[in-house]
Image (cartoon, helix red, strand yellow):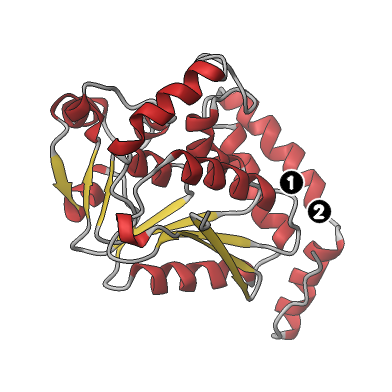
Amino acid sequence: MNARVTVTEANQIAFVALSRPEKRNALDLQMLEEISDTGASLASRNDIRAVILHGEGNAFSAGLDLNEIPKLAQYVTQNGGIMKRSHGDANLFQHVTTVWRSLPQPVICALHGYAFGGAFQIMLGADIRIASPDCQFSIMEGRWGLIPDMGGVALMRRLAREDVVRNLTYTADKFTARDALSWGFITELADDALARATEIAQGIVEKSPDAVRAAKELFNRTELTSEAATLLIESELQGRLIGTPNQMEAVVAGLQKRAPDFKD
C-alpha cells in the first residue's frame, strides 16, 4: 500500500506530511496508524530539533474518510473497544493527536485549505499552529452523530473559551481562519503557512536543544499544576540546564557574537 505519511528532513527539521492528496488527506485506518507511529518514532531522535506537520495537495485534511467507518468499527471491535488504553493513557485515535504534544521537540502545524473533524483535533496537538487566511475549520463530528473523541476536548478547551468550544461542537459549523485566530485555536495567519512554519522552526533549531526541550517539558508538566508545584518544576528544569555544555556554549557564543555550536 502507498504510504499515507511521508517524512523528509532538512536542517534538523522533520517535515511530516499527510500524503493522501487524491482523497484530500482524509483519515483512514492506515493513515491514523502511520501518523501515530511516525510521531512516536520521532521522540527518540535527538538530531531532530523541530517538527513541522502539514498536508500535501489542496488541504491539510478533510477529516475522517466516511468510507472507512465499517473498517474502523471492525478495528475497534477486534481490539478491545475504544476504552482500551493501547498507547499509554490514550487509544489509537487519541494518540494520533496527543503524540505531537508529548514529543520532546516543538511541533508546528502548517494549515491550508481546511482542517475538519479529526484533522482539527490533530492540529491541536501541535505547539504552534500557522494557517493560511483562506483555511476553513470545523469540529465536524456532530454532523455524523458523533462527538470529538481524538483528544481534542482536552486540548481545545485550553485554547478557547468553553462557550465557544461548546457552540462549535454542538453546531458542527464551519468557521474561518480569522475566527480561529480570534478564538485562540490558531497562533497566527500567513499567506504561505508552510514557509512561515519553516521560518519558525529554523529559529528554534538555532537555539540550545536542551533549553528548548526543557521549555516544552515545563509547559507540558505545568498545564494543570498549582503555583507552588509550577515553581518547583521551574527550578528542577532550570537546575538541569545550568552549567551544562550547551548552556555554556549559548553564553560564550553570545558574548563572542557568533553562531553557537550546540551538540545534540
x then y, percent, for residue 137: 23, 47
Q: Residue at x 56, y 59 (%)?
A: 51
Name the mark on residue 238.
Answer: 1
Q: Is residue 28 above or below residue 188?
A: above
Query: Which one is nearer the viewer's eye here, 113 or 223?
Result: 113
Image quadrant assignment for residue 169: top left
**Element carrying mark 1:** helix
Q: Dividing the image into 4 quarters, which one contains the C terminus?
A: bottom right
In the image, 166 versus 161, the foreground residue is: 166
Residue 107 in sight here: yes
Q: Residue at x 66, y 62 (%)?
A: 49
Is residue 154 in view from this perspective? no
What's the amino acid at mark 1? Gln
What is the three-letter code of the residue carrying label 2?
Ile
Q: Residues within 10 Å of mark 2 (few under 14, many from 20)?
A: few
- Residue 133: numbered disc: none
Q: Are marks 1 and 2 in contact (CB under 8 Å)?
A: yes
Residue drawn at x 33%, y 66% is 57
Q: Position of residue 200 (x, y in %)?
A: 48, 68
Q: Which residue is mark 2?
A: 242
Figure quadrant of residue 230: top right
Q: Quadrant of residue 95?
A: top right
